Amino acid sequence: MGRERLLLLHHATRRLLLLLPRSRGFSSSAGAAASSREPLHVCVVGSGPAGFYTADKMLKGHEEAQVDIIDRLPTPFGLVRSGVAPDHPETKIVVNQFSRVAANGRCSFYGNVTVGSDVSISELQKIYDVVVLAYGAESDRSLGIPGEDLRGIHSAREFVWWYNGHPDMCNLAPDLQSTDSAVVLGQGNVALDVARILLRCTSELAATDIADYAFDALRGNTIRKVYLVGRRGPVQAACTAKELREILGLKNVRVCIKEADLVTSTADEEEIRNSRIKRRVYELLSKAATAHKGYISNDQKELHFVFFRRPTRFLPAEDGSTVDAVQLEKTCLKDGVAGKPVAVGTGEFEDLKCGLVLKSIGYKSLPVEGLPFDNYRGVVPNLKGRVLSSESENATVESGLYVVGWLKRGPTGIVATNLHCAEETVAGILEDDKKGLFMGPGSKKQGRRGLLEILEQKNIRFVPFDGWEKIDSKEKMAGQLKNKPREKITTWDELLMAAN
Amino acid sequence: MLARISRLGIQAMRRATPGQNSLNDISRRHLVEAVTSHVNHMGKTFFCSNTSATSNDRSNELEAKISVTFIDKDSEEKLVKVPIGMSMLEAAHENDIELEGACEGSLACSTCHVIVTDVNYYNKLEDPVDEENDMLDLAFGLTETSRLGCQVIASPELDGIRLALPSATRNFAVDGYVAKSH
């Protein structure tokens, strides 16, 4: 009885305090009447493009926003550092903009902090008004076919992390010397990236920021044929013109495309008409099919575009544990949902010999405790970035929880796609702020101070942005000695040491 | 005589578009040149003057400028003066217009996408090269008269051009997303 009265008194006092006039002047933002003049404490989990664009828009959209960006790696920038290929340095220029965001006085970076183990979602919700999940997709879709765990089969994500020096993958040690044929399953831009890195003259990679051990492995690689295998046809290929143009123009690589695969159905032609990207991709593939006919030289490597084939099993070599071939089933296209054709098996099979398989069929997000998750789509259920309790129709909005980037939309798009994605999510946050959703009894949050307390209690050695700057300058200095933009530091221990 | 020149100079400064060049930005040499050209080209408005022998001097702050109107995603308009030879992306940044430029002009992104509102101005531009088209393919809210701001360079025939920034739409198609049946 007494306790209830105390609580009532507590809540009444808080409400009274909130009604007292503020000493600061009026906020310049429209509709500020309901929004607090107190700092708005925002935590962004994940420091890739989604996280940084969110921080940027948040700082610009709310004068009192204090934004903390957390990442489990000691280095920021997510896939810009660990996904973009070494021979695409212009795509990495965006880190300049992200660094300016991190330098903002209202923004702090905390690297080497893992949400889910070092700090939980519910702990973050207690100390921040707004928690935005931007941790992307660190797992893979699986094919679910026999032999998938044979040696020599990797996901493209692992291979990309390996050549980009991600500390989780520095010991992958893919065997590039026991076979002359590699099969890449999938025909999106990531598939093209891995095929291109395998086929490029290594002299062209020497002056890039590729991890040193990967450069050494590629220099000695015996792979001469790379097959890019897709379930459907050229019109459905997910790659885009720039990447396709680049791989078709590789030095000393003969491109093999069957003209029969380029025949289009009425449905295909409709798809081409409705999409500028598909039209240009189709034109590039058609030109390549005729251009390379009859031109064979012995030193050339080969790039084969294989369409209308889906993998049904992996076949082992004599040792029983390494992959020796992939069994493919011929497919044909049938109308699917929303006008997108689906591949259907025809019962005709063939084997494609190979010693290396890279699966590039899509990334997948990982669930984390305290966050609703849609296992089918591999994303957090949400409505324009506001997290929902589930993917069902009766779902309710989870207060204070938001999502952005691949975790929100699925693992597609380019760096810039996150710009617009972040704008949408931040618009939702600002709307909710104006409605007063972050105010109310017991709502005064500690923000940064609360986070630092938790990290200290648990003895977590977080890496602040200037810790990353130390890593950055060490990498650049080491790179200068080898005419590379940087020599990446690739193990956890060395990264943490360099940050101090 | 000096007093007269400096008075003319100050008048010339006042005639310059307000808010463009502060007195501090102009070096004494340019001030003398401005005054001389003002005296020599009476009646011509200051900011259109082409100083003859020094027109090739890039550091000359008084080079010709064109008028460009930026329309932001909330339909707010801003008229700015852009020196000949400057890209629209640079011009936007010089004038605090929120045009992103993630790759800083290296044709590796589409964030500086602008829409040329008048097709006559669009046609005056040289056709985009393959590399620009590749990036435009991916641009948000692409239209028939879209270009990348870093590739549109100010030239005299573009005087008066109006460029709209694409506005956020609510359609985020997730590629490959298949609607679940209930």
Image (spheres, rainbow, N blue to C red):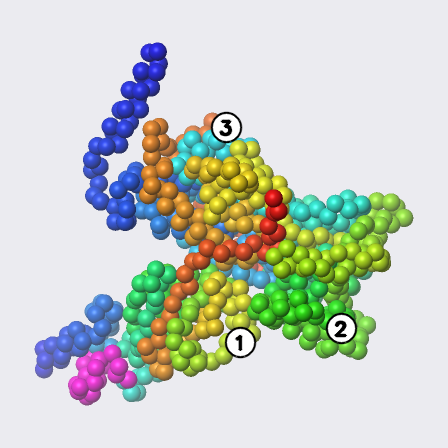
Residue at disc 2, secondary structure: helix
Q: Quadrant of the N terminus of chain A?
A: top left
Residue at disc 1, secondary structure: loop
Residue A303 lies in quadrant: bottom right
Q: Position of residue A432 (x, y in %)?
A: 37, 42
Q: Position of residue A114 (x, y in %)?
A: 54, 37
Residue topped by disc 1:
B129
Query: Camera-side residue: A306 or A358?
Result: A306
* Residue at position x 50%, y 34% in the image: A121
Is B37 magenta? The answer is yes
> What amino acid is found at the position of numbered circle 3 in the picture?
Lys
Side (left or right) of B7 relative to A218 = left
Q: Mark 3 near mark 1, Cβ–Cβ under 8 Å?
A: no
Instruction: Bin the neighbour count of mark 2 within 10 Å (Cα to Cα): few under 14, some 14-19, many 20 and up.
Output: few
Residue B35 lies in quadrant: bottom left
Circle 1 chain: B
Circle 3 chain: A
> What amino acid is found at the position of numbered circle 2 in the picture?
Glu
